[in-house]
Image (cartoon, rainbow, N blue to C red):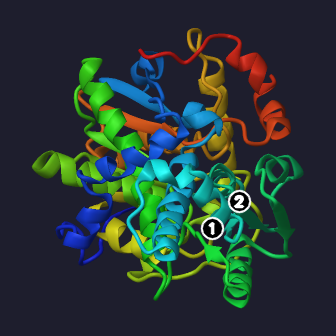
Amino acid sequence: MQFILNPLPGFGRPLSEHERATVGKAAPEKVRPFLVLWGGAPETPLVALPEIADAIGIRSLTIKDEGHRLGQGSFKSLGGAYAVMVLFRRLLEKHLGQEVRVAQLVSPVAREFARTVTVCCATDGNHGKSVAAGARLLNCRSVIFIHAGVTPSRAEAIGADEIIRIDGSYDASVDEARRVAAERGWLLVADTSWPGYEEIPGLVAQGYTILAHEALDQAAAQGHGAPTHVFLQAGVGGFAASIAAYLTDRAGADKPRIVIVEPSRAACIYESTRAGKLVSVTPAEPTLMAMLECYTPSLTAWRILEKVADAFITVEEEDAEDAMRRLASRPVAPIVAGESGAAGLAGLLAAAADEPLRAALQLGPDSRVLVINTEAATDPFSYTRIVGRAPEAVAAGGHAAHA
């Protein structure tokens, strides 16, 4: 494990008005009307982990279990599909020359128009699954680009009309999706941003704020209190920045300490922090935390994280595996967390075992920590190999109900 406290000159500066409008405390109410099209998007559980809290010497630990989100097995279902809906609404309004209500997005007129629209993106698995689901809901065509490291089971689960596999890394698949979308006039719904392409990733990130809003309300209702520390796993950083910005805007002066967790094999945000500017890292050995295997940070995410993240840490492959097994072996309400899903908890466990970092983060007996299981077992074969039981067998041991 490596760690660095935020040394950047922008640390502590307020979010911009645009950032607050996109992923601040008012953002969930912009998202909620669209989720009605998906059955209202029932809340995912917030589960207390007292046995782990006691073991590492903190007051409380809760985990938001996104493995139950919308039947998609991942928090990503909130972002990509939402962005597809918002963007399709704009296209439909332009086509009809009039305002369109959310409920009208699935009308016969809308569904006929949707047949002319193709949406695409690059993915490690979950974002593409969400984009494809949003397209399917509206009757659009979806084309998803995946890279060489996406396993067959993850590719099959995406559910797109067409899957295009390319050689190289995730970043290479992003480049190919950009090229083909521009060439063919497709709607590119990426969850990472670059100069000139920032609004759509902002919409994706806006969708994620729903889970942060739920987590805080659930923590209060369950008597846990607001978190003092939050460990957020990061790939390109869109998820982490979204949750961090929402928590910062809502909590104000009581902002929790925010710790960004990345695989040591794909630590582009950690390395950008060390460099003092956004940088790419050179792909090397793949990480089993496949949904976090990204080598260039999202520009908009970086702008937020440099202001609000308190620390950045890296974790090893075995850290993620250990966290998966600890969640699966709980005596009550075992939790199915994939390799990337368990990364936030892996970061907490690594930090708690490192006395200098523990002291630097003021992680102690009064700490209330929130982590997020961002995905269930997206690759059941890999999960079974690591945990020793199939995900359905773990889930059968008890449902992760509200604590």
Q: Quadrant of residue 50?
A: top left
Residue located at (20% from left, 48% from top): 250
Q: Which residue is mark 1?
A: 294
List x then y, in percent, for residue 182: 67, 88
List x then y, in percent, for residue 326: 61, 25
> From this viewpoint, is residue 355 visible?
no
Q: Quadrant of residue 111?
A: bottom right
Would residue 253 appear left or right of 270 to someone viewing this image?
A: left
Q: Please identify the quadrant where the N terminus is shown.
A: bottom right
Q: Which mark is residue 147?
A: none
Closer to the chain start, of discs 1 and 2, is 2
List x then y, in percent, for residue 4: 39, 63
Residue located at (57% from left, 66% from top): 267
Q: Is residue 161 above or below residue 395?
A: below
Q: Residues within 10 Å of mark 2 (few under 14, many from 20)?
A: many
Q: Nearer the viewer, residue 166 or 53?
A: 166
Q: The residue tagged with tag 1: helix, strand or loop?
A: loop
Would residue 263 appear left or right of 378 to someone viewing this image?
A: left
Q: The residue tagged with tag 2: helix, strand or loop?
A: loop
Q: Nearer the viewer, residue 20 or 382?
A: 20
Q: Which mark is residue 124?
A: 2
Instruction: Say which amino acid is labelled 2.
Output: Asp
Q: Please identify the quadrant where the C terminus is shown.
A: top left
Would residue 134 appear left or right of 47 to someone viewing this image?
A: right
Instruction: Say which amino acid is labelled 1.
Output: Cys
> From this viewpoint, is residue 306 visible?
yes
Contact between marks 1 and 2 (CB within 8 A): the answer is yes
Q: Is residue 214 above or below residue 243?
A: above
Q: Nearer the viewer, residue 142 or 98?
A: 98
Q: Is residue 92 above or below residue 394?
A: below
Residue located at (57% from left, 47% from top): 77
